[in-house]
Image (cartoon, rainbow, N blue to C red):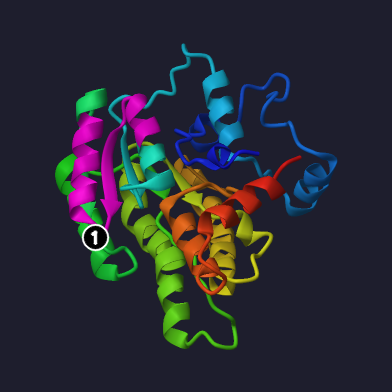
Amino acid sequence: MALSALHSDIGIVKSAALKGSWKKTQPHPVLFRFSKHAQERNRKTGGYTVSAHCLKQACNHEEKTTDFGLTDKVAVVTGASAGIGLAVARGLAAEGADLVLVARQAERLNEAAQALSSEFGIRAVGAAADIATSGGVDAVLEMTTREFGGADILINNAGTGSNETIMEADDSKWQFYWDLHVMAAVRLARGLVPGMKSRGGGVILHNASICAAQPLWYEPIYNVTKAALMMFSKTLSTEVIKDNIRVNYVNPGLILTPDWIKTAKQLTEETGGDWEAYLQSVADSMEF
């Protein structure tokens, strides 16, 4: 597999994120193109792992006449200035949704908001905030209410990989990732769900990770907090389904984002620093 096949420009997996499933006909030819090993692994873990390349093909396979009913809906997307978050925001904008884009870097965030507004004719605003803090979440909630009166969709995507051992990582590092990956989702749900109820329902989608089910050796904190996010999704779903709010999570496999490049550089800095070769070896190992 070429390294470019892992690229993050996947748009949005529209059926999973917004409708809950593909059309109830035959299994989608791309999504179900797995090896026997992958099928068995997914049967055991209860999920599917597909590459960004497959997801992009799957999205393109969807009929162009499909209307997902997102015109004038409001979506809050965290981690929206780059990578998966920006790709998801772009997919939502293409379907007519207005956006609250959330990230820490204000300049890059505002550039993304302006670009999406101009290209798709929707309204997008940037909320520069650190959602690992309660104050940052409060700022996002305040802007969402002020600009749009609430939200119909919440995409919890903000997150980053870690690099440590359990024996060496101190409490503060554990706490940082817990706040970013879990408490941000908890606080945003608490703040946005009441508004979703008053609007007749909504959708909450958490971007967890395949590491929630199959850990990577070098980032135990990431593995644990993403697993917690997955269970939070299941628990929240049972609480708000009565209010017509659907909660799902996705466990993506390896997708080439700026965060993965950062990780590859960290993992290779003591062995010559050939991070591109490392990523290529990862891509090669995914062939099936």
**Residue 108: image location, x then y, percent:** 23, 49
Q: Could you say which quadrant of the image residue 84 lies in?
A: top left
Secondary structure predominantly adopted by residues drawn in magenta: helix
Q: Nearer the viewer, residue 214 or 145?
A: 214
What amino acid type should be assigned to the residue bearing mark 1? Ala
Q: Which residue is drawn at 20% across and 42% down?
A: 111
Which part of the image, by quadrant, shows the N terminus?
Answer: top right
Q: In this view, does 147 lie above or below 230?
A: above
Residue at the image position 26 percent from the left and 59 percent from the top: 104
**Residue of label 1:** 129
From the top left corner, tell me how far across and down residue 45 is, in percent.
74, 53
Helix, strand or loop for disc 1: loop
**Number of callouts:** 1
Is 27 in front, or is 238?
Answer: 27
Q: Was residue 215 drawn as part of the magenta stretch in this picture?
A: no
Q: Horizontal and vertical percent for residue 268?
A: 54, 67
Horizontally, is 22 left or right of 156 in the view? right
Q: How crowded is mark 1: few (under 14 residues within 10 Å), some or many (20 or more)?
A: some
* Magenta-colored span: 90-117
From this viewpoint, which residue is outermost toward the top?
65
Judge by depth and name the residue closer to the eye, 61 or 132: 61
